[in-house]
Image (cartoon, rainbow, N blue to C red):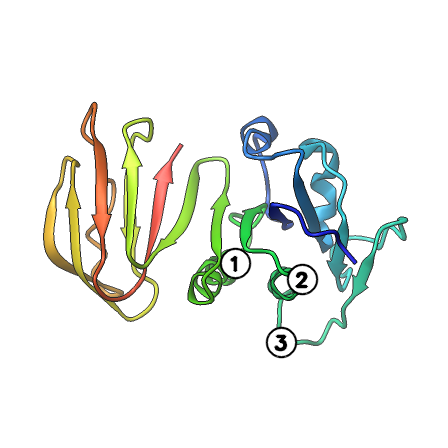
Amino acid sequence: MIERKKRCVIVGGAPIGDYGRIKAYLSDNDDVICCDSGLRHREGLGVEPTLIVGDFDSHENPHADVETIVLPREKDDTDTFYAVKEAVNRGYDEFLLVGVIGGRLDHTLANLSILYYLDTIGKTAIAVDDYSEVEVVSTSATVDDSYPYFSLLNLSGEAEGITITGAKFPLENGSVTCDYQYAVSNEPLKGQIAQITIERGRLLLIKDI
């Protein structure tokens, strides 16, 4: 059984080009779960997993002295989604997902849906790749001017009552639908913090780094 710590880091098998950038988000206090081919990022990230999960169709089972959950190849959950559900069952409330964006588009979209899942059950989560931080906004969020751009994208239903202040392109009581994604490449005003509020629905907030 993993000893519960402050945050759970989920490492997927998507490409990571700049390990230094991703390592800046890691903490010595993290618990790390490697999902199948996420094992190939161990050296680059300088981490050792406290749990390994996978069906090992894309990476050999290392048979390491680490708790390992071997999954069947025919299943509903991806290895990454299963790992997240397992971590939720073990009591984690905060998540960092790395190696989950890029490569295969189907896996990227499925992994982004994990952020929606975690938000619906009251967990805190962000996904980080070489270019951006991604999180779900269902009530409010802020973006400071250390981020050059930010975008709001809708992947599910309709988001309404959206207000953005402190940004180059402000918005008052707007809506974003899946078939019209216009809230892309906004910019926090210099010296200000962009404020985002949403009355109904959920959006992906993508902050360029």
- Measure the alpha-carbon separation of dots 2 and 1: 20 Å
Nearer the camera: disc 2 or disc 1: 2
- Which badge, 3 or 2, comes first in the chain's sequence? 3
Q: Residues within 10 Å of mark 3 (few under 14, many from 20)?
A: few
**Quadrant hosting residue 195:** top left
Position of 195 with respect to 64 (left or right) is left
- Measure the alpha-carbon separation of dots 3 and 1: 14 Å
> Element at badge 1?
helix
Asked if residue 4 is positioned above or below residue 159 in the image, the reply reads above
Where residue 205 appears, as percent x and y from the top left, is 34, 49
Q: Residue at x 30, y 55 (%)?
A: 153
Can the viewer see residue 186? no
Amino acid type at circle 1 is Asn
Q: Residue at x 45, y 62 (%)?
A: 122
Q: Which residue is mark 2?
A: 90
Residues marked 2 and 1 touching at CB (< 8 Å):
no
- Which badge, 2 or 1, comes first in the chain's sequence? 2
> Element at badge 2?
loop
Q: Which mark is residue 111?
A: 1
Amino acid type at circle 3 is Asp
Q: Residue at x 62, y 60 (%)?
A: 91
Amino acid type at circle 2 is Arg
Front residue (pair 125, 151) = 125
- Measure the alpha-carbon separation of dots 3 and 2: 20 Å
Q: Residues within 10 Å of mark 1 (few under 14, many from 20)?
A: many
Where residue 162 appears, as percent x and y from the top left, is 18, 56
**Quadrant hosting residue 165:** top left
> Element at badge 3?
loop
Q: Residues within 10 Å of mark 2 (few under 14, many from 20)?
A: few
Position of 205 with respect to 191 (left or right) is right
Where residue 128 appears, as percent x and y from the top left, is 50, 42
Q: Which residue is mark 3?
A: 76
